[in-house]
């Protein structure tokens, strides 16, 4: 028990160093703690197993913050490799989070094939998890999988992935709705590759009917409207009036929103609308 307590104390020290911005010191101590828990088994003391996972996951987080994304991706893989009981919701959502973050790091360094594999492993392993946190990780992985397919020049597969994941999504739950809008944006980009911009723009209609109580949803809707305007204005017909209407509508809806992230997103809308109006001026 004393050894377990010492391990937990060391983890607390690492977390304090991270919180205070002493990343390199925290990283060095993570390496040592990971070595001390290298032999952890599935039936180990729960605190020892949790410390083993946390040391590796914290190491991956620190590497991510330091911009060492390739090494971070490997660190997340090591965290996900800590023995886990997949029937325990707390343990499985931690593993799912590590797998998801691995894919995100790989996407960020344009290793899309490896990222796709990471997302597919996560989806396959935890697709039937019923706890909300693991389900959220699976949903994000499914959306990211569609984006990775698009990045790999597989637009038809990306569209198919979006259509499949949309089926079970709520139009009112905050996370579902946020990911739904992001998925539609991916499908629109893929459709723009395969068809006309007008067809891509049409996929982004109907978003105003979604529940947008959460600021993250509103930010996604604003981004979708901006992309829709670009599709309309960039079409061979150059429908700048329709593009301007979409942007004016989103400004009317969210212009007084107090959330800083929403206002930051609207700044790009205001700038683009100004450009469109200037181009239409006689």
Image (spheres, rainbow, N blue to C red):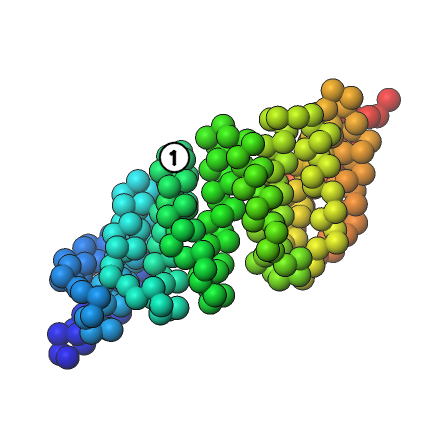
Of residues 242 and 28, which is closer to you in this image?
242
Outermost residue on the top side: it is 236
Residue 121, percent from left and from top:
37, 48
**Residue ID at (39%, 62%):** 93
Of residues 58 and 173, which is closer to you in this image?
173
| Position above or below: 108 against 22 | above
Residue 33, percent from left and from top:
18, 61
In the rendered structure, the answer to whether residue 118 lies left or right of residue 183 reads: left
Of residues 276 and 183, which is closer to you in this image?
183
In the rendered structure, the answer to whether residue 146 lies left or right of residue 198 reads: left
**Residue ID at (43%, 51%):** 123
Mark 1 lies on a secondary structure that is helix
Quadrant in the picture for the N terminus: bottom left
Report which quarter residue 176 is drawn in: bottom right
Give the labeled residue for mark 1.
Answer: 113
| Position above or below: 132 against 75 | below
Residue 258 in view of the camera:
no
Residue 169 in view of the camera:
yes
Report which quarter residue 177 is drawn in: bottom right
**Residue ID at (50%, 53%):** 139
| Position above or below: 244 against 260 | above
Residue 127, percent from left and from top:
45, 56
């Amino acid at each position: 028990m004393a050894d377990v307590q010492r391990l937990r104390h060391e983890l607390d020290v690492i977390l304090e160093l991270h919180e205070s911005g002493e990343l390199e010191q925290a990283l060095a101590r993570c390496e040592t703690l990971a070595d001390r828990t290298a032999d952890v088994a599935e039936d180990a003391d729960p605190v020892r197993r949790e410390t083993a996972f946390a040391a590796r996951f914290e190491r991956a987080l620190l590497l991510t913050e330091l911009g060492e994304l390739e090494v971070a991706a490997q660190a997340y893989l090591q965290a996900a490799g800590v023995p886990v009981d997949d029937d325990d919701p707390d343990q499985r959502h931690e593993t799912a989070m590590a797998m998801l973050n691995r894919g995100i790091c790989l996407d960020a360094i344009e290793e899309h094939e490896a990222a796709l594999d990471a997302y597919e492993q996560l989806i396959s392993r935890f697709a039937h998890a019923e706890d909300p946190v693991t389900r959220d990780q699976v949903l994000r992985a499914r959306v990211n999988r569609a984006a990775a397919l698009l990045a790999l020049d597989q637009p038809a597969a990306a569209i198919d992935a979006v259509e499949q994941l949309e089926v079970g999504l709520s139009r009112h739950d905050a996370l579902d709705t946020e990911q739904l809008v992001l998925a539609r944006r991916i499908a629109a980009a893929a459709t723009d590759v395969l068809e006309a911009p007008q067809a891509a723009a049409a996929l982004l209609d109907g978003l105003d009917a979604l529940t947008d109580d959460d600021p993250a949803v509103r930010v996604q809707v604003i981004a979708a409207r901006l992309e829709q305007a670009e599709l309309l204005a960039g079409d061979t017909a150059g429908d700048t009036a329709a593009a301007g209407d979409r942007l004016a509508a989103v400004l009317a809806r969210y212009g007084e929103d107090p959330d800083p992230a929403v206002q930051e997103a609207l700044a790009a809308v205001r700038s683009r609308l100004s450009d469109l109006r200037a181009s239409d001026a006689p």
